[in-house]
């Protein structure tokens, strides 16, 4: 049986990808994400911290991995900065979140119409 690490081995941080390859990487992201999505319990894309807070209150996860820039804005008893994550599985989860965030930021700026369609397809 192929596991999470095998399905997510293609993940790279957006900064590690050359500028000439970023467009190709972004184009392939939705199809590659489809293989990882069944292994995730929840996928939600939110654009402000207040929406994230409401989501966290409803889900009550055991641990929340928060982007370093948003760490002080998110209120949750069990939270950790993404830069502090070391274990491979959790590191992959951070990469998935970073990749999705970059993908939707680019899509929002370049193709707002497609943005809504993709949002529905990605969320779980």
Image (tube, helix red, strand yellow):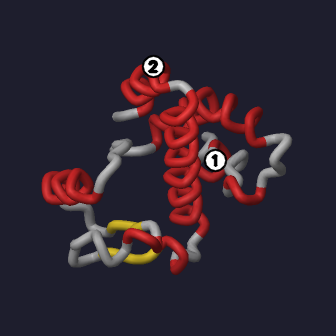
Q: Is residue 116 left or right of residue 51?
A: right
Task: Answer with the quarter of the image where residue 123 lies.
Answer: top left
Report which residue position mark 1 lands on: 8
Q: Report helix, strand or loop for mark 1.
A: loop
Residues at circles 2 and 1 in contact by the CB criterion of under 8 Å: no
Identified at 57% across, 72% down, the residue is 87
Mark 2 or mark 1: which comes first in sequence?
Answer: 1
30 is higher (above) or lower (below) than 92: above
Q: Quadrant of residue 119?
A: top left
Is 37 placed above or below 66 here?
A: above
Helix, strand or loop under label 2: helix
Assess disc 2: are there few (<14), some (14-19) or many (≥20) residues with their C-alpha within 10 Å of its C-alpha.
few
**Total marks placed:** 2
| Residue 105 picture location, percent across and down | 51, 43
Pick out the residue farthest to the front.
109
Query: How far across and how far down the image is residue 84, in percent?
Result: 52, 80
Tell me which residue sits at (51%, 57%) in the image.
93
Q: Residues within 10 Å of mark 1 (few under 14, many from 20)?
A: some
Q: In whole angstroms, how far apart are the C-alphas of marks 2 and 1? A: 28 Å
Q: Which is more toward the observer, 105 or 71?
A: 105
Q: Is residue 100 above or below residue 71?
A: above
Residue 50: which numbered mark, if any? none
Residue 48 x %, y %: 30, 53
| Percent position of residue 124, x then y | 34, 34
Res 113 label: 2
Image check: 28 left or right of 100?
Answer: right
Q: Please tell me whether residue 120 is drawn above or below residue 101 in the rendered image.
A: above
């Amino acid at each position: 049986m192929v596991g999470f690490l095998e399905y997510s081995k293609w993940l790279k941080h957006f900064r590690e990808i050359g500028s000439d390859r970023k467009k190709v990487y972004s184009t392939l992201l939705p199809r590659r994400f489809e293989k990882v999505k069944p292994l995730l319990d929840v996928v939600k894309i939110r654009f402000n911290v207040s929406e994230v807070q409401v989501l966290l209150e409803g889900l009550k996860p055991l641990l929340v991995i928060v982007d370093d820039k948003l760490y002080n804005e998110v209120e949750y008893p069990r939270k950790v900065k993404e830069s502090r994550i070391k274990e491979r599985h959790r590191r992959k989860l951070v990469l998935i979140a970073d990749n999705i965030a970059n993908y939707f930021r680019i899509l929002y700026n370049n193709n707002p119409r497609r943005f809504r369609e993709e949002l529905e397809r990605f969320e779980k």
